Amino acid sequence: QVQLVESGGGLVQAGGSLRLSCAASGRTFSGYAMAWFRQAPGRERDFVAAIRWSSGNTYYADSVRGRFTISRDNAKNTVYLQMNSLKPEDTAVYYCAARFGFPTMDAQDFRSWGQGTQVTVSS
């Protein structure tokens, strides 16, 4: 059973940076895609970024491309989301997700989820 534990959220001023971590366990993740989604109050869960564990290929939402970077550490079984130049509209609960196969941008394709970590960007 896949287990995902996020950490690294917090309060930051606009223009600042945060790094989120997602510690993954319960599987060998070489055949998996890992992703970050976010959900603001009253909104749907939106795709942020994804990475194919084996190849390291990355994918980004247009709203974060050039500001956010997703990466993975094979030795630590951990996925990261480096967030730079943060904006108030980035405020949301950020979720780590995993699925066997290729990355998609649809939350419904992901079967395993972490508990979420709050990111708040003040103006």
Image (spheres, rainbow, N blue to C red):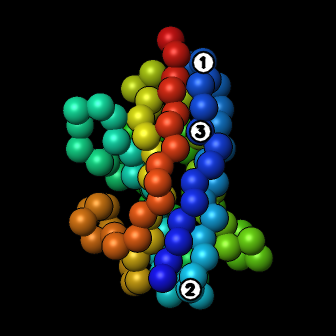
- Asked whether the residues under the numbered discs 3 and 2 touch, taking CB atoms below 8 Å apart as contact, a structural biologist would say no
Which residue type carries mark 3? Gly
Label 1–label 3 contact, CB within 8 A: no
Kindly identify the amino acid type of the residue bearing the numbered disc 1: Gln
Residue ID at (65%, 32%): 17
10 Å neighbourhood of mark 2: few (<14), some, or many (≥20)? few
Dividing the picture into quadrants, the one containing residue 71 is bottom right
Mark 1 packing: few (<14 Cα in 10 Å), some, or many (20+)? Answer: some
Please indicate whether residue 102 sits to the left or right of residue 121 in the image.
Answer: left
Q: CA distance from mark 3 to mark 2?
A: 25 Å
- 89 shown above or below 62: above
Q: Which residue is mark 1?
A: 13
Say which residue appears at 40% left-offset and 70% top-offset.
112
Q: Could you tell me residue 99's position as x and y percent?
A: 40, 76
Q: Is residue 84 left or right of residue 48?
A: right
User: Total of numbered circles in the picture?
Assistant: 3
Residue 9 is tagged as 3
> Where is residue 104 drawn, in percent x and y?
33, 68
> What residue occupies the far top of the structure in this picture?
123
Q: What's the CA distance linking mark 1 and mark 2? A: 37 Å
State the SS at label 2.
Answer: loop
Q: CA distance from mark 1 to mark 3?
A: 13 Å
Q: Nearer the viewer, residue 25 or 13?
A: 25
Reading the image, the residue beneath label 2 is: 27
N-term mark: 3 or 2: 3
